[in-house]
Amino acid sequence: MGAPPGDEFDAFVRDVEPRLRRALLGSLAPGVVSDAVGEALAYAWQHWEEVRLVLNPGGFLFRVAQSRSRQRREGLLPGPEPSRLPDVEPELGVSMRSLPQQQRMAVWLVVACGWTYAEAAEAMSVSASSIGTHVARGLARLRQELGVGQDA
Amino acid sequence: MREGFPRSIEDQLRVWADDLETLVEDLPPAYQVAPRGGGGRGRVMAAAAAAAVVVAIAAVALLLQDAGAEQVPADAGTVEVAAGQSFRFEGDDCWVEPTYRERIDHLADLARQMPGVSNVVVVPPVLEGDVAAERWADGTGLEVFLDLSVEARQLEDVRLALSDEPDVDDSRVRFVDRDEQYQLFRRYFQDQPEYLENVDAEDIPESFRVATVRRDGAIVELDGLVYTARTPGETVIVLENACRDQNVARAVRVIVN
């Protein structure tokens, strides 16, 4: 498998790395996210001929990064820092962690990280239509638990 | 919602993600990350398998760009689909039977709620680079780890609850005791002495290794309601009973023959 041209891979990293890092914060402890992103990008470097063909490389590398992180992945979404985040409801973290895994991940990727349904579907190995369902149900449950309406 | 937090849920999630990003150190450029060295036939085979997955995903992604999707006949009991052929499900009220992946994730969610369970690990979608890849080689879909201090009654309750799940192959719910877990651990991490030195047998949880009933042969790839076959001879079965159960016009199962 050939190594990518430097310029091409630089551009790829500039596009994918920030989005991948943000997405992984939803399922990995912050302390290991950098290593996980590095592992995923190393994989992309080693398998460039294949990765460059993937329609949603961010979603695919998300799976690679999770697979290569051997620590427990579930329920690690850390709570907001109250001292630095006056605009976030503290119970939001509790409510997010109470969501079923698929709903939590879909909400995180699509809403918090701005991924498309197709990208999230690639990351979670489910269909794009399933992502839509998970996001809708997850947000509905968050609104119910936090007592907010659609617009608040 | 407390007063003083007027932002929408969506806005708050984005703010939260922004904040978490500040906790992560800046990454070095990717090309400074030393790729893992090769080594071992198993690793080479795993890498080849991962590459095959990538190629398959890429192929499906390209095929999905084909706008010439056919409509599935409404009265069809089964539809044979050639590799690369696309078709569109009717309307919005179509239910696709949960894939293998979705079903084991659902099982994992259930298991996490059981008393005495400390963690549930689901077979990773990509095994290359996973030191414990052999754990999944026998068809195990998920492994349910127990609390270190689990009581005998809780252990039996977990076993019964798992076996009762319709998606679980109850003949393949296997208890892995601490001795076996420790031996596995020593084998998986034989090249990492820092792990071996700092983890004793009593630190290793017992588990149930669980296999699911595989009703479908592969993950279904859907883009909206368009399905594209990835291998020759796939069969789409219209499930009449599921239509009633799910209260939808069309319910389908995809089988890779």
Image (cartoon, helix red, strand yellow):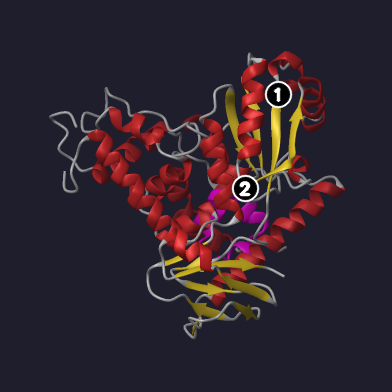
Between the residue at mark 1 and the residue at mark 2, the CA separation in whole angstroms equals 22 Å
Q: Principal SS element in the magenta part? A: helix
The spot of residue A96 in percent (x, y) is 37, 36
Please report whichever mark, 1 or 2, sits nearer to the chain's N-terminal start. Answer: 2
- Which residue position holds label 2? B167
Element marked by disc 1: loop
Q: Residue at x 70, y 77 (%)?
A: B232
The spot of residue B159 in percent (x, y) is 66, 30
**Viewer-side residue, B85 vs B44:** B85
Region in magenta: A40-64
Q: Which chain is indicated by disc 1? A: B
Q: Which amino acid type is shown beneath numbered disc 1?
A: Glu
Element marked by disc 2: loop
Is the residue marked by circle 2 packed among few (<14), some (14-19), or many (20+) residues within 10 Å? Answer: some
Q: Are marks 1 and 2 on the same chain?
A: yes
Q: Is residue A145 shown above or below A60?
A: above
Specify whether A91 is left or right of A8: left
Q: Which mark is residue B206?
A: 1
Is the residue marked by circle 1 packed among few (<14), some (14-19), or many (20+) residues within 10 Å? Answer: many
* Residue A29 visible, this orientation: yes
Residue B58 forms part of the magenta stretch: no
The spot of residue A17 in percent (x, y) is 48, 50
Residue A61 forms part of the magenta stretch: yes
Q: Is residue B97 shown above or below A29?
A: below
**Viewer-side residue, B132 vs B117:** B117
Q: Is residue A23 shown above or below B154?
A: below
Q: Which amino acid type is shown beneath numbered disc 2?
A: Asp
